[in-house]
Amino acid sequence: MEGDVAVAVHAESSNGFAQEWKQSEDLTNGHSTHTLMCNGIKENGGINGSSYLKSVPISALKQNGLLQSLAAGGDQTEADEVDSELERAQQEWDALESIQPVPVEDLTPSALISFNEALQHFQTADLGDLLRNIQPTVRRTGLAVVTHFLFGPPRLHRELMEERDLVFAIAQCSLDNTQPVHMRVLQTIYRKLTCAKADCPRYGPHWENIGFQGTDPATDLRGTGFLALMHTLYLVMDPETLPLARDLYKLSQHPVQNFPFSVMSINLTRIVLHALREEVLTKECNRRQQVVGVLNEFYVATVLHLYEVWRSQRKTISDSGYVLKDVEVYAKKNPKQLLKHLHCYLQERRSGIGHRTSPDPLSHSNRSLGDRVSLTHSHGGKEGKMNFTGVCELPPEMEGEARLI
């Protein structure tokens, strides 16, 4: 009798795959032959021994489709990972291409601007609309007209009226972010006072370090316009007056006698502008045949007078209103004495008798229209001396908030 007898045995291989072993007995001529079959594949050998645990060749498993799904799954996972990596790399590359390099000129500070260069900008600019709105003299009526004609100062020479009107037009001009000259003036003032070598942002609390009242200097220029910045520019860019500017700036940073430097300077410009409108400076302008130069010198003289009063009398911010009023009254009544005091002060500076001049790594010549007449000036070192930290060594920091305008 010939026939096959199959016995199925289920086992699990070491790799976790189910294996079905079948033993078939082939009866031929009375002899039985045992054959092992694993998942349909014949295995030579008997049932005894380790034949049940014998590993099956990988090629055989592949042929029977057991690894096809595994291989396909592995290939798919690997392909997905590769695609994901490529996508991320492409995104990073696209982002890198979108980043624009910073131009070299943006990393370098702007060139300092002299008073003359800034003045030439306004001399060539179209200020027609502003000129129509200026008030160059005080309007008088009735008896005041007669009194002023008989006892008042002489009229300004006709050839100087255009220069005078330009001053009042600049005082009507606001700070313009689109004008490179305006921005350079602002940066020059900041860098000369703080000894900074790089430009600072247009807006920010750093402007309070030099005495503005907020993050935007433009908000403090009420009543004086760009003329206030022009006066400060003249003060810091003239090598002879820069030491005075830094002395005043150091005093403004004093722990007790501190005050907002820029706001104080703006108020002094307002005093000078009123003096010009009230024709207090007409006689001196006619004598020198210039307006801008006399105005600059008169501004520096008021700065010196304020500095001496504030320092010697140990004034504080609570005294600012009274001090400014006194400075205005004195300046208008004694313009000649004020200018003479300035001359003596500068002469002492030149001879080394006065205050020690601070080193200035950024200083260069700044001769203005006012320099046609040699500037000299006076300050006595007779008051009690106070010890201040050098301006380049002092971390600028304002204490409190001052409203002087």
Image (cartoon, rainbow, N blue to C red):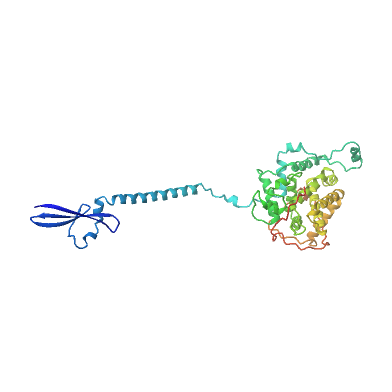
**Residue 95 visible from this viewpoint:** yes
Instruction: Say above or below: 106 vs 143.
Output: below
Query: Which residue appears at 67% of the width and 47% of the height?
Result: 183
x then y, percent, for residue 236: 73, 53
Considering every residue shown, the one lying at the far left of the view is 29
In this view, the residue in front, 158 or 213, is 213
User: In x, y percent, where is residue 138?
Assistant: 84, 40
Q: Is residue 245 left or right of residue 48?
A: right
Judge from the rendering whether residue 194 lies leftward or rightward of residue 355; answer left or right.
Answer: left
Q: Residue at x 32, y 49 (%)?
A: 72
Work out whether residue 367 can be spotted. no
Image quadrant in which you'd find residue 29: bottom left
What is the number of callouts on the image? 0
Locate residue 320 relative to residue 73 in the image: left or right: right
Identify the residue shown where x is 74% and y is 38%: 130
> Percent x, y for residue 193?
71, 55
Q: Nearer the viewer, residue 76 or 313?
A: 76
Residue 24, image x and y in percent? 16, 54
On the rendered structure, is 264 left or right of 67?
right
Pick the front one: 298 or 134: 134
Residue 398 falls in which quadrant of the image?
bottom right
